[in-house]
Amino acid sequence: MEHLKRCVCVFAILSIAHGDVRDGFFVGGRFGVSSESPSYKQNTPTSAGATRSVSATELSQDAKQDIQDVLQLLKNLNGSLVRAKDGNQALNDLSSISLSSLSSIRTLQANIANILQHLQEAINNSTNNGQNQAIMSQYRAIVNELQTLQTQITQEVNNYNQELNSQKQNYDTKHAAYEKTKQEYQGKVQAYNTARDSVTNIINNAPSMTCGFNAGCSSNQLTTFLNDTAALVHDLQILAPLNPKFSQNNPQQNYNNAYSSGYNQAVSVQTLENLAGYSVNSATNYFTNLLQQLNMYPNLQTQANLNLSNLISLAAWFNHQADIIEALKYSNPTQFSNYMQGLLNNYQGVFQDLTINAPNLNDAVPPATTALGNGPQFSLSNQFNFPYQNFAPQIQATYHQLNAIPNIALPHTIQIKPSLAPLAKSINQSSSLFSNISYNVDLLAGYQYFFSGHFGFSFHVSVGYGYIHSPIFNSLSFFKHLQDIKINLGADLIYDFNTPTDYKAPIYYGVFAGVQGGNTNFVLNTNNRALWRASYNLGLDLGLRFQFSSNIIKVGVDIPLVPYKVNWQTDLGSFQLNRSAKDIGFFITYEKLIF
């Protein structure tokens, strides 16, 4: 005790003299998970001729224990079905139920058959065996009930797995088709909205393009006018096939007909040249009268007949007529200017009317939801539909029947010859990483010291508890839990990336590497007792550390350095825990400097 006080005093003096806020004694906790490699192997007979002497009562008890183990395995399977039924029925939250325990059930059934055969032979060779024959009849009835329950529960699990996979596949297929249709719809909506926004912007901007009757149009105004008429034709060409009301039969043919109706009625160059001497005012009136005569836009004030076809015809007419007038640009500049300004004045007037009567424009170019609808809907439920059956009452009734059977008593021992049936020789082990997982919690205390701006070290002592979860415990009813208690010593070398400035930096961050090891005591809980085993551990710790004032957080990986095996032998077989470098773990530690 005196030596410990001296060590504490020395470290305290070093911390005060050094003045680094990172130095000092700490306490903390650590939580981690690690991969484990447990395995189970069923006992197998060493030779076909080996025999042993047992009493009839012992054999009866062995038979009962094996029957109880089979019932427990069947109960576990039924429990998986019950948990599936009582849990969330969303298809994505459900998974197939494993039938891996069937191999253990078959092994136990072979043992039961072997025991009952020896009992029956012994009873047949004894006198006054009426009561024992009745007991054997009860055993055979229970064995038949076990076989029936196994068949029913296995079939139920198979039906559950098949139906779950079928419904998942059906749901996934239809949902994928829905997602594809939805993406197509969203693509159409995006294209429709882009084209519609462009159309409405062109129409809304048209009134601001007027040049007046006496003032000439600038080259920029004319360029904008020509570009807008071409863009209007292009955008309407996109909108037409996307609008089901316009394109129910042949969208391309409907568009072509509307476009041709306007395009073909544009006045030719020869006709315009023959109308020599037209002023801007005369040209404006000429095109206004022409529009009314052509019946493309019968009522310029009310737009009574405005629809998408009329709008396509109007756009095609203005675009083509502008192209025809542009042919006069060099041969007759005066006519070109007057006709183009007159056409532009009509363009401005027509679309000004449309902006004043917006509802009529919406009828011709409706919003996307009106034209395309609200899009595809997905109504298929993702809830699993399955007629679950619960076999718990039958299992419980069989338990009661078994408990009511008395033991068989004979005056002589029985020579047992091991069954040659193919007992379970397989090792119940999963080699995939983290298929068996250990959860660990530790409390620790230690000291940290930095001997330079970057480098330091720490050492600690810890006490911990671990719980190992493995699928083996779900399939083997006679094994319940595997836990451990650890006492470890550890030390780390630390490197911080940032060097303290006056030893008062708010945050330090760096890396650490070290080892820790000590004593581990495992306890394997079985049906009737707890089996303890002592072992050791030595591991390499690597990770990152962050220190905020007196608070230290570490995250890292733990790699076993020395492999070891822990073995438990039972009457039914052996359970083994193997640890090697592949059984890595991850952890997070919080430490608090106390002085």
Image (spheres, rainbow, N blue to C red):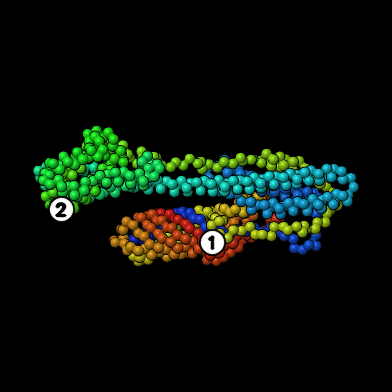
Task: Residue at 43% x, 61% y: name it.
Answer: 543
Q: Position of residue 301 (x, y in %)?
A: 22, 34
Q: Amino acid at mark 1?
A: Asp
**Callout 2: SS:** loop
Q: Position of residue 110 (x, y in %)?
A: 74, 53
Q: Residues within 10 Å of mark 2 (few under 14, many from 20)?
A: some
Horizontally, residue 460 falls left or right of residue 548, namely right
Please report whichever mark, 1 or 2, sits nearer to the chain's N-terminal start. Answer: 2
Q: Reply above or below: 481 against 397.
A: below
Marks 1 and 2 sit apart, C-alpha to C-alpha, by: 85 Å
Horizontally, residue 483 falls left or right of residue 139, namely left
Q: Which residue is mark 2?
A: 329
Q: Nearer the viewer, mark 1 or mark 2?
A: 2
Q: Residues within 10 Å of mark 1 (few under 14, many from 20)?
A: some
Question: In the rendered image, is residue 227 in sight?
Answer: yes
Task: Residue at 79% x, 43% y: name it.
Answer: 138
Q: Quadrant of the C terminus?
A: bottom left
Q: Nearer the viewer, residue 311 or 224?
A: 311
Q: Nearer the viewer, residue 41 or 190?
A: 190
Horizontally, residue 420 falls left or right of residue 155, namely right
- Image quarter of residue 10: bottom left
Q: Which residue is mark 1?
A: 583
Task: Residue at 30% x, 46% y: name it.
Answer: 260
Q: Position of residue 369 (x, y in %)?
A: 36, 40
Horizontally, residue 339 falls left or right of residue 117, namely left
Q: Reply above or below: 42 against 394.
A: below
Task: Residue at 64% x, 40% y: name it.
Answer: 390
